[in-house]
């Protein structure tokens, strides 16, 4: 029986580590569903978990590259808070006085400012690490302290709120979604794109003489991919918008509200942003020279340098990318809260590192996947949300998360040792 299962997995080309992560996620959902009378498995909770996962998952995709190159970034949580506070001050204090309150360009400037700030700060850290050869641990630990302090100085610790109405849509909520119709369109397009990518990959392998999966195995994987995407959209479209929010939305759109009216949320905008980031980062990791250089440098830095790769400049680029993704995450996090205080981003650096490691990124460098980091972030958030749902105290939540992180690293070490990696 075991041989048949192994043969089936080989034909489908499934990664045992990926299956293990998905299995762990399903177990977490079922266990917390049982202890919450299945409320944890409701569309409402899945919607909230997806939105809460987005900012950490976005940063985790960049942390994969950082760890793959045998570095670490302890500053991302503080950097997220510093960028979030600065961008919030732009919207609340500075831009309205220059452009006027409610100007349509405020949210655009805020978004570009967040990404640019992140890229510049990340590149500066990468330059110190790559060209001045200061260890990444020390540089980013310094950044952790500097950005957290600078965050306070931006506004003297004052909370910045409310944010621009359009900017707030990027954080999800009742209005920050695609809506039912666009969600179905989004799901259909995403499913078609997924199938097209799988077909092109199969054709490319066949053209270059590589072994391809049997047609039936490819068909099963395609059906699973399309089915999961459409199932996710269906769940998101099953969460009705509360009446209070519906009244505000209908009034803003000039529609008469009636008691029998029912609108559903649909896919949240932060999830769309996360999907776009995941696709782009996957393409960078698997289809570009930069991605190949990242993994080559992580596998053997000396050999990579001798082969002509400018590892110092590569370090700058990796940290600049990490910073830009932190800027995107700060947009999602601050927009979701509609306010920024000095606590924004606290401990996010640990959640991001944990997500990447749980997702299979090797701390020794050279190995890691983008989709693994996203699943790792979802596991972390599901675990924390589930414990909060059953009334577990915050200190005990931290204990459990720490235990899970150590366990995940130990399992990864055992897996790589048996696989001879």
Image (cartoon, grey):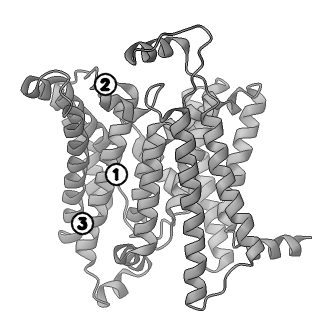
Q: Quadrant of residue 2?
A: bottom right
Residue situated in front as seen by the camera: 418 or 285: 285
Marks 2,3: beta carbons within 8 A: no
- The correct choice, above or below, for 245 with respect to 26 in the image is above
Residue 325 image label? 1
Report the disc number at residue 316.
3
Measured as percent of width and height from the top left, residue 324 is found at 29, 52
Q: Which picture quadrant has residue 399?
A: top right
Is the residue 184 above or below the residue 293 in the image?
A: above
* Residue 8 falls left or right of residue 28: right
Upstream in sequence: badge 2 or badge 3: 2
**Label ID, residue 165:** 2
Disc 1 from disc 3: Cα separation:
14 Å
The percent coordinates of residue 176 (x first, y second) are 43, 31
Q: What's the residue at 48%, 16% (across, down)? A: 245
Q: Nearer the viewer, mark 1 or mark 3?
A: 1
Q: Nearer the viewer, mark 1 or mark 2?
A: 2
Tell me if label 1 and label 2 are in contact, CB under 8 Å: no
Side of 210 where 283 appears, left or right: left
Counting from the top left corner in percent of width and height, residue 292 is at 40, 77
Report helix, strand or loop for mark 2: helix
Using the rendered image of the protein, determine whether residue 352 is visible from the camera's viewpoint.
no
Question: Mark 2 or mark 3, which is nearer to you?
Answer: 2
Determine whether the residue tagged by mark 3 lies in a helix, strand or loop. Answer: helix
- Measured Cα–Cα span from mark 1 to mark 2: 22 Å
Q: Quadrant of residue 42?
A: top right
N-terminal of the pair, mark 1 or mark 2, is: 2
Q: Residue at x 28, y 68 (%)?
A: 315
Residue at position x 35%, y 29% from top?
Answer: 168
- Percent from the top left, x then y, of residue 344? 35, 32
Q: Tell me: residue 122, above or below residue 256.
A: below
């Amino acid at each position: 029986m075991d041989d048949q299962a192994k043969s089936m997995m080989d034909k489908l080309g499934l990664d045992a580590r990926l299956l293990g992560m998905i299995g762990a996620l399903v177990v977490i959902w079922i266990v917390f569903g049982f202890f919450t009378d299945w409320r944890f498995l409701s569309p409402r909770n899945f919607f909230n978990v997806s939105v809460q996962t987005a900012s950490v998952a976005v940063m985790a995709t960049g942390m994969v590259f950082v760890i793959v190159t045998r570095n670490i970034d302890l500053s991302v949580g503080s950097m997220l808070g510093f960028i979030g506070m600065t961008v919030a001050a732009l919207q609340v204090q500075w831009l309205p006085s220059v452009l006027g309150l409610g100007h349509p360009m405020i949210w655009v400037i805020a978004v570009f400012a967040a990404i640019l700030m992140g890229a510049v700060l990340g590149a500066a850290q990468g330059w110190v690490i790559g060209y001045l050869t200061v260890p990444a641990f020390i540089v980013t630990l310094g950044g952790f302290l500097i950005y957290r302090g600078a965050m306070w100085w931006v506004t003297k610790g004052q909370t910045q709120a409310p944010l621009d109405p359009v900017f707030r849509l990027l954080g999800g909520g009742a209005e920050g979604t695609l809506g039912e119709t666009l969600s179905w369109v989004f799901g259909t397009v995403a499913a078609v794109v997924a199938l097209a990518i799988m077909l092109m990959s199969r054709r490319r392998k066949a053209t270059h003489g590589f072994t391809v999966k049997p047609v039936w195995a490819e068909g099963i994987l395609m059906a699973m991919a399309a089915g999961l995407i459409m199932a996710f959209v269906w769940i998101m479209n099953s969460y009705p918008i509360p009446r209070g929010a519906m009244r505000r939305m209908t009034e803003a759109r000039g529609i008469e509200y009636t008691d029998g009216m029912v609108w559903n949320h649909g896919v949240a905008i932060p999830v769309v942003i996360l999907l776009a980031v995941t696709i782009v980062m996957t393409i960078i990791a698997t289809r570009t020279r930069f991605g190949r250089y990242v993994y080559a440098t992580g596998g053997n830095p000396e050999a990579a340098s001798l082969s002509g790769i400018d590892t110092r400049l590569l370090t700058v680029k990796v940290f600049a990318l990490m910073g830009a993704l932190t800027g995107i995450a700060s947009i999602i996090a601050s927009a979701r809260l509609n306010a920024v205080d000095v606590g924004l981003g606290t401990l996010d650096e640990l959640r991001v590192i944990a997500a990447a490691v749980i997702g299979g990124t090797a701390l020794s460098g050279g190995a890691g996947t983008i989709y693994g980091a996203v699943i790792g972030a979802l596991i972390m958030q599901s675990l924390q949300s589930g414990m909060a749902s059953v009334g577990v105290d915050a200190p005990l939540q931290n204990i459990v998360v720490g235990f899970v992180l150590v366990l995940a690293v130990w399992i990864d070490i055992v897996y790589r040792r048996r696989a001879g990696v």
